[in-house]
Image (tube, rainbow, N blue to C red):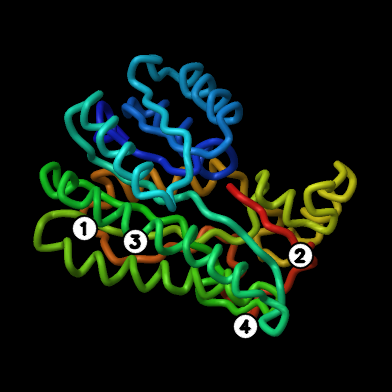
């Protein structure tokens, strides 16, 4: 991934899971980084892991805050451009999960999912697009297998990911003539904090419950097991690099083949809010 060296990448939701894994991998490839998250302590720990992976501390900018806030979005752009003078890559990873059946979903739950998973992504991408046009850069959205595979107990969440996939393709069409590529990754079950918190025990999930949950999810992927954050991160890095220079508007499954055998996606989850 030589083409990623010295590129400036923004990774949202970088304090855990896929976002953290992506930040660490991009650090190894020589990117300069802006990392966002709502948990300051976890974000600081992710920064240290990026430093350990080879990224100088002065080449990492952090923004702690909620991306639903337009001021936080503007801070991401301003701090990145001030520190590095450019933006080459945007990885829209930050998101939230709320599991509830359609007939049991409240308006507040619905609004929270839509605002975090889609509205914030839409308008952050809009804000950063002019900078990406200057550099002929790339956007990678972190979607989900649930964008195309229904899950009754996660209807509103599935809707946000279906919207993410359509947004990916629409934005790709708009920005292609300007040299900017837009793609998404669509993971299946991935071993991460968000997965742990969405398993049977919710926020109080024990190690034993989490292990059993991953075993159950692993039986639903033809390749066996579940993805690790670095598995998804490698695909994100590929889509952000020049190795995929002729790829845009594509939704790439990183799900061990699960989408090939499932009409719907079923899982055993708690009814609780989970954040990346």
Mark 3 and mark 4 lie on one chain; the one further toward the N terminus is 3
Give left or right: position of 82 versus 124.
Answer: left
Closest to the camera, between mark 3 and mark 4, is 3
Mark 1 and mark 2 lie on one chain; the one further toward the N terminus is 1
Q: Residue at x 26, y 49 (%)?
A: 138
Q: Residue at x 52, y 19 (%)?
A: 48
Q: Are marks 3 and 4 in contact (CB under 8 Å)?
A: no
For the N terminus, the quadrant is: top left
Res 271 label: 2
Q: Give the Cα distance between marks 1 and 3.
A: 23 Å
**Would you call the spot at circle 1 few (<14 residues within 10 Å), some (14-19), or many (20 or more)?**
few
**Looking at the image, which is closer to me, 27 or 198?**
198
Res 263 label: 4
Give the structural element (helix, strand or loop) at label 4.
loop
Residue 267 vs 83, above or below: the answer is below
Q: Are marks 1 and 3 in contact (CB under 8 Å)?
A: no
Q: Give the Cα distance between marks 4 and 2.
A: 23 Å
Give left or right: position of 46 versus 164.
Answer: right
**Looking at the image, which is closer to me, 13 or 50?**
13
Q: Residue at x 10, y 57 (%)?
A: 178
Give the structural element (helix, strand or loop) at label 1.
loop
Mark 1 and mark 3 lie on one chain; the one further toward the N terminus is 3
Give the structural element (helix, strand or loop) at label 3.
helix
The residue tagged 3 is 122
User: How far across and how far down the image is residue 80, in percent?
Assistant: 27, 32
**Looking at the image, which is closer to me, 58 or 65?**
65
Q: Give the Cα distance between marks 2 and 3.
A: 26 Å
């Amino acid at each position: 991934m030589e083409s990623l060296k010295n590129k400036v990448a923004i990774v949202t939701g970088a304090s855990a899971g896929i976002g953290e894994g992506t930040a660490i991998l991009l650090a190894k490839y020589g990117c300069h980084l802006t990392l966002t998250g709502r948990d300051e302590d976890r974000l600081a720990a992710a920064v240290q892991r990026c430093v350990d992976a080879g990224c100088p501390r002065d080449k990492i900018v952090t923004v702690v805050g909620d991306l639903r806030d337009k001021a936080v979005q503007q801070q991401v752009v301003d701090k990145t451009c001030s520190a590095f003078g450019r933006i080459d890559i945007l990885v829209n990873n930050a998101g939230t999960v709320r599991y509830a059946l359609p007939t049991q979903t409240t308006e507040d739950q619905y609004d929270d999912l839509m605002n975090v998973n889609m509205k914030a992504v839409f308008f952050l991408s809009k804000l950063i697009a002019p900078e990406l046009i200057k550099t002929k850069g790339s956007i990678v959205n972190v979607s989900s297998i649930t964008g195309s595979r229904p899950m009754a107990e996660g209807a509103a969440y599935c809707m946000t990911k279906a919207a993410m996939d359509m947004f990916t393709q629409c934005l790709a069409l708009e920005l292609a003539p300007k040299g900017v590529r837009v793609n998404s990754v669509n993971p299946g079950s991935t071993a991460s904090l968000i997965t742990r918190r969405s398993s049977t025990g919710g926020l109080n999930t024990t190690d034993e419950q989490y292990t059993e949950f991953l075993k159950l999810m692993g039986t639903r992927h033809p390749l066996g097991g579940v993805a690790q954050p670095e598995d998804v991160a490698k695909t994100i890095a590929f889509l952000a690099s020049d190795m995929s220079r002729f790829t845009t508007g594509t939704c790439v499954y990183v799900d061990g083949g699960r989408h090939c055998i499932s009409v719907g996606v079923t899982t055993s989850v708690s009814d609780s809010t989970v954040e990346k």
